[in-house]
């Protein structure tokens, strides 16, 4: 999967979780940029990605992601 | 030796700094090695046997970490690496458990099953809880490939650096070692000026403010321990007084630690940021003992929540957050991990039932705060009016919650805590010092049915205690804190100045190396030095 493909999947997942179809994620998006995307929803979002893509992030990485781009890049690495 | 002792300030510190600067002229390695030697001497000062206890544990951790470093470089040995990590964590927990909790576990077993185990009193090495957490964090960071290389000297320096050895902040290798590796190891006027100012601020907070209020708080707790009934006013003086005592004690220690590290050109992470100004309990924990919160969040709470969320969502159950959170997810993914983390925090502070209760109570506070955020009124008509009403309400609730919990933290037994809490809600009656009661005039008749005259506190003691509370509350709540005052010079890692409003107190008091500040700090230093000499340990040094 390419980065734009992953971004599309991520956007769909977050829209479903937050019930907000206006969300558009970019590589530079941070949690603070999206209304309602708090630390609790962040963990739910990460696990939803894991289930969708059948990957598993490392705990240490989950804590250190700062942008959506970081999550996308690591997903691409894990997907091989 | 204590930071607030003559031998530390006038002998140990000057000799250590002189050695560091002189050795730094020829070699950074020698200067850094000197810090390790000085830190060992500092640690050995109370009881040399402390070094014999802690040194082997440092060596074991070093060997395990080196092994882990080799294993993590080889992808095929991930399983063994994980095993070594678990072994290292287990070793540290058992080490801490033996020295800190053996006596408590024996007592708890006796209480539970009526046995009569007696353990010889195990000597608690100073700062063991801080040192152990730091060593665990290091092993996890090596396993997580956030540390790529280290020597025994580097590791020793990281664990033993005396400014933060006994009571934190709990630091990460990756934030400390680059600083040591780039340290100039030379006299630097700015570092000395900033370091000295932070140290004086801290010393004043500790020996003048914290020790000052403790003289009014300790007798009330001693009376409660002895089983005396504590009435409404003394109970509140004790509860709020101790909250302010530990606030200035820990804040003072944290400032001194920042200042001492800065003498060596090193910035420690911030550990204390005006927690009593917090307007909710989540905010309080982001400001009080910040590096402990960071440790527990990163290494216990987050992994636990992630693990539970994975299990839950794999069963097609919803996770937590968003606009329609379920109560089951809230309890399973938030309340449970929060209560567990806070009870560990309580137990970390001390081996006793009251510390665990203190942690659990904070767990309840945090859960209520999260519940309010998730389920509380979201659609307040106007954000401005919401803030106008909720911020002061939140501040008062937070302050009172913290003060009530501190009664559990400070009380030496359950009976004392019960007396004080009963007193705070008026169950032990209301009394005023006899001399004040006699001055009530016409009110005396009106109040006589529920306000009695007491000889427990004199009028002078009562008024003085109230005055102390008033002054300390004003300082804690209205003045800018040390980090804000010195922000222009990055007093702690990543703490930088933000633009202050033109007519603000912060702008007026902004610290710079000027004559007025030199005079003010000299006055604080003189006031502090005149009170040196008492054996007044920092409250957090017992952990």
Image: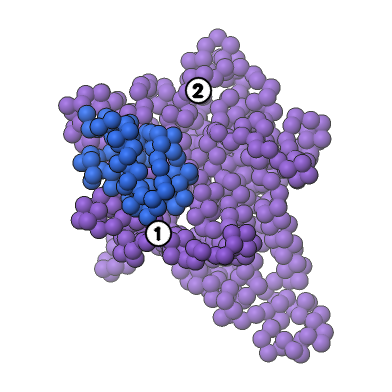
Chain colours: A blue, B purple
Residue B328: x %, y % from top left: 31, 64
Q: Secondary structure at mark 1?
A: loop
Q: Which corner quadrant of the image does residue B105 belong to?
A: bottom left
Q: Is residue B179 above or below residue B298?
A: above
Residue B194: x %, y % from top left: 67, 30
Q: Residue furthest front?
A: A22
| Residue B396, visible in the rendered structure | no
Closer to the camera in the image, B146 or B526: B146
Q: Which corner quadrant of the image does residue B278 belong to?
A: bottom right
Tell me which label, 1 or 2, sits earlier in the chain: 2
State the mark number for residue B323. Answer: 1
Q: Chain of mark 1?
A: B
Q: Residues within 10 Å of mark 1 (few under 14, many from 20)?
A: some
Q: Residue furthest top?
A: B26
Residue B141: x %, y % from top left: 35, 33
Residue B510: x %, y % from top left: 73, 37
Q: Nearer the viewer, mark 1 or mark 2?
A: 1
| Residue B255, visible in the rendered structure | yes
Alpha carbons under labels 1 and 2: distance apart: 47 Å
Identify the residue under disc 2.
B180
Q: Residues within 10 Å of mark 2 (few under 14, many from 20)?
A: many
Closer to the camera in the image, B215 or A33: A33
Q: Is residue B115 above or below residue B443?
A: above
Residue sitting at 36 percent across and 61 percent down?
B325
From the viewer's perspective, is B522 left or right of B184? right
Q: Quadrant of the N terminus of chain B?
A: top right
Do marks 1 and 2 share a subunit?
yes
Q: Is mark 1 in CB contact (under 8 Å) with mark 2?
A: no
Q: Chain of mark 2?
A: B
Residue sitting at 48 percent across and 15 percent down?
B29
Q: Secondary structure at mark 2?
A: helix
């Amino acid at each position: 999967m390419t980065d734009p493909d992953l971004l599309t999947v991520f956007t769909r997942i977050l829209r479903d979780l937050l019930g907000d179809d206006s969300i558009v994620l970019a590589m530079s998006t941070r949690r603070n940029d999206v209304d309602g995307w708090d630390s609790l929803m962040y963990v739910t979002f990460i696990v939803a990605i894991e289930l969708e893509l059948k990957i598993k992030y490392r705990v240490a990485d989950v804590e250190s992601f700062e942008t959506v781009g970081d999550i996308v890049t690591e997903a691409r690495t894990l997907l091989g | 030796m204590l930071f607030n002792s003559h031998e530390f300030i006038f002998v140990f510190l000057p000799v250590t700094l002189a050695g560091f600067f002189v050795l730094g002229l020829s070699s950074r390695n020698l200067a850094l090695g000197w810090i390790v030697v000085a830190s060992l001497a500092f640690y050995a000062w109370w009881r040399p046997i402390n070094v014999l206890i802690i040194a082997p544990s440092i060596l074991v951790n070093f060997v395990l970490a080196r092994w882990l470093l080799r294993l993590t470089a080889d992808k095929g040995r991930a399983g063994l690496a994980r095993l070594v990590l678990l072994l290292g964590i287990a070793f540290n927990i058992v080490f801490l458990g033996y020295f800190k909790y053996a006596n408590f576990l024996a007592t708890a077993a006796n209480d539970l099953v009526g046995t009569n185990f007696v353990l010889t009193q195990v000597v608690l090495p100073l700062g063991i809880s801080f040192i152990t957490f730091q060593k665990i964090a290091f092993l996890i960071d090596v396993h997580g490939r956030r540390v790529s290389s280290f020597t025994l000297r580097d590791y020793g320096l990281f664990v033993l650096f005396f400014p933060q050895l006994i009571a934190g902040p709990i630091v990460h290798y990756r934030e400390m070692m680059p600083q040591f590796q780039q340290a100039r190891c030379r006299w630097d006027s700015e570092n000395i000026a900033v370091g000295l100012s932070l140290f004086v601020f801290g010393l004043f907070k500790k020996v003048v403010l914290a020790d000052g209020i403790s003289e009014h708080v300790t007798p009330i707790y001693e009376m409660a321990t002895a089983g005396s009934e504590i009435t409404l006013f003394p109970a509140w003086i004790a509860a709020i007084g101790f909250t302010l005592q530990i606030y200035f004690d820990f804040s003072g220690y944290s400032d001194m630690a920042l200042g001492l590290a800065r003498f060596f050109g090193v910035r420690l992470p911030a550990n204390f940021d005006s927690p009593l100004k917090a307007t909710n309990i989540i905010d309080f924990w982001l400001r009080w003992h910040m590096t402990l919160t960071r440790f527990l969040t990163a290494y216990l709470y987050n992994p636990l929540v992630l693990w539970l969320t994975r299990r839950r969502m794999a069963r097609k159950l919803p996770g937590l957050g968003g606009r329609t959170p379920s109560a089951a997810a809230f309890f399973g993914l938030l309340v449970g991990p929060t209560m567990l983390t806070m009870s560990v925090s309580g137990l970390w502070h001390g081996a006793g039932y009251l510390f665990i209760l203190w942690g659990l109570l904070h767990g309840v506070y945090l859960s209520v705060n999260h519940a309010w955020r998730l389920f509380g009124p979201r659609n307040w008509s106007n954000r401005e009016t919401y803030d106008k009403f909720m911020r002061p309400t939140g501040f008062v609730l937070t302050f009172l919650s913290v003060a009530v919990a501190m009664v559990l933290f400070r009380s030496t037994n359950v009976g004392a805590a019960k007396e004080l809490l009963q007193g705070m809600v008026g169950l032990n009656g209301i009394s005023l010092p006899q001399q004040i009661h006699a001055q009530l005039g016409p009110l005396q008749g009106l109040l006589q049915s529920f306000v009695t005259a007491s000889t427990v506190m004199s009028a002078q003691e009562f008024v003085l205690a109230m005055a102390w509370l008033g002054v300390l509350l004003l300082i804690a709540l209205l003045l800018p804190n040390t980090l804000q005052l010195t922000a222009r010079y990055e007093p702690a890692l990543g703490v930088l100045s933000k633009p202050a409003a033109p007519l603000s107190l912060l702008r007026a008091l902004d610290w710079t190396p000027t004559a007025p500040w030199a005079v003010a700090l000299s006055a604080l230093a003189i006031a502090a030095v005149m009170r040196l000499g008492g054996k007044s340990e920092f409250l957090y040094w017992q952990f």
